[in-house]
Amino acid sequence: MNARLVAVVVMGDVARSPRMVNHARELVANGFEAVLIGYRGREFEAPAGVRVRALEGGKSAPRGSSSVRFALTAGWRMSRLFPALVRALLREKPGAILMQNPPSFPTFTAVAVAARLLGSTVVVDWHNYGFSLLALRFGNSHWLVRLARWYEFSAGRRMAQHLCVSRAMQEDLLQHGIRAEVLYDKPWLETEAEERRSGGLIAVYPAGWTADEDIELLLDALELAPDAGVTVYITGEGAKEDSLRARLETLRAKGVLVDTGFLSEAEYRALIRRADLGLSLHRSSSRLDLAMKVVDLFGGGLPVCALDYGGSIREQIEDGATGFLFRSAQELAALFTRVGSKPEMLEAMRDTVRERWPASWSEEWKRAVCLH
């Protein structure tokens, strides 16, 4: 076993897991060795000194599949991923394993097996709950969701250390016998704003195109306020994109929306530097997690208009100070009209964002993560 090596486990596309990449970067900066273990996905540049061991993720069940087909497809994928992850960990022989949750299965089980054989310490970073994401597909009362909930908490209680993304999640985990340290996402490097342009405002929406993002609400708002003087840039790509293609094209033709697709890191940062406002349409499945993309927007000094899903959102967005909260398309359309007619109101908010969300991931990480 290599006591200075930490395996950072992401049972997902590593390129889409910036928090775990930041963990790996910080580990190296603090004298550890780090290897990222996750799915083969979009190519990305790993942080200096960080190795990547890629796994084949396989295909998920199509949207709309029955619970039986979903369970069979997931079972087949997991039967392949479980031994692959165990083998990867046994070959690396890390002294500690830092795993992302969700997904919970097979991550918890595979990590527990490898850690027992190696004598490794396991740290769980709770981003959300896997069973709550599953409930978006089947509902809270479905047998798969109830089984996943039992498994997730019972497996989690067996791990040595825990991190989580919000105070609300920390309190909820404690109700299930899990003591976690809050590690707020912070910008790794602050993005300096460019000189502001004259003319209409630019709003940036970094979209994941996933089921827990209400992109439809944003499109409704743009249709309600096409003359607000705000142009929205939607980045990224994903599963929901095809079903919304016709609406995206109509709004693009009206000049109120630019669908950029996936951007390189440099292009993404350049867009944030040009922007005036950030958007978040994250609708938390658990009401306990926070939107990672908001951190990027705060890093550029942008106030953020965020969907108010209740729960933990007010730990991240202070309404009227670092951004605005809305609950409906009508409210978002009104916000577009308001900031479009009075763009100067965003200047003081930008100063507040920079004051309250400094680039301090390193300080947060050193406080919360106890690896020696």
Image (cartoon, rainbow, N blue to C red):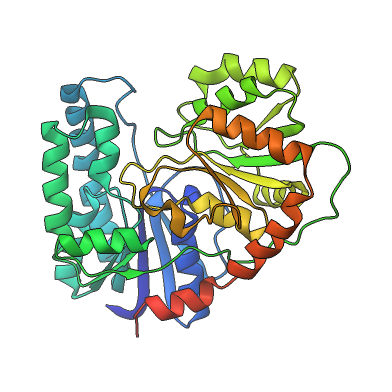
Q: Is residue 105 left or right of residue 241?
A: left
Where 15 sits versus 307, above or below?
below
Q: Is residue 372 left or right of residue 172?
A: right
Visible residue check, residue 354: yes
Visible residue check, residue 358: no
The residue closer to the viewer here, 162 or 221, is: 221
Q: Residue at point 22% right, 34% down? A: 74
Where 262 sits versus 264, above or below?
above
Q: Residue at point 67% right, 53% down? A: 302
The outermost residue toward the right is 198
The residue closer to the viewer here, 138 or 316, is: 316
Number of dots carrying numbers: 0
The residue closer to the viewer here, 38 or 207, is: 207
The outermost residue toward the bottom is 372
The residue closer to the viewer here, 278 or 35, is: 278
Quadrant of res 96: bottom left
Give coordinates of residue 306: x percent, y percent: 53, 44
Give coordinates of residue 41: x percent, y percent: 47, 43
Where 212 sits versus 295, above or below?
above
Quadrant in which the C terminus is drawn: bottom left
Give coordinates of residue 43: x percent, y percent: 55, 46
Q: Is residue 23 left or right of residue 132?
A: right
Q: Residue at point 44% right, 80% down? A: 366
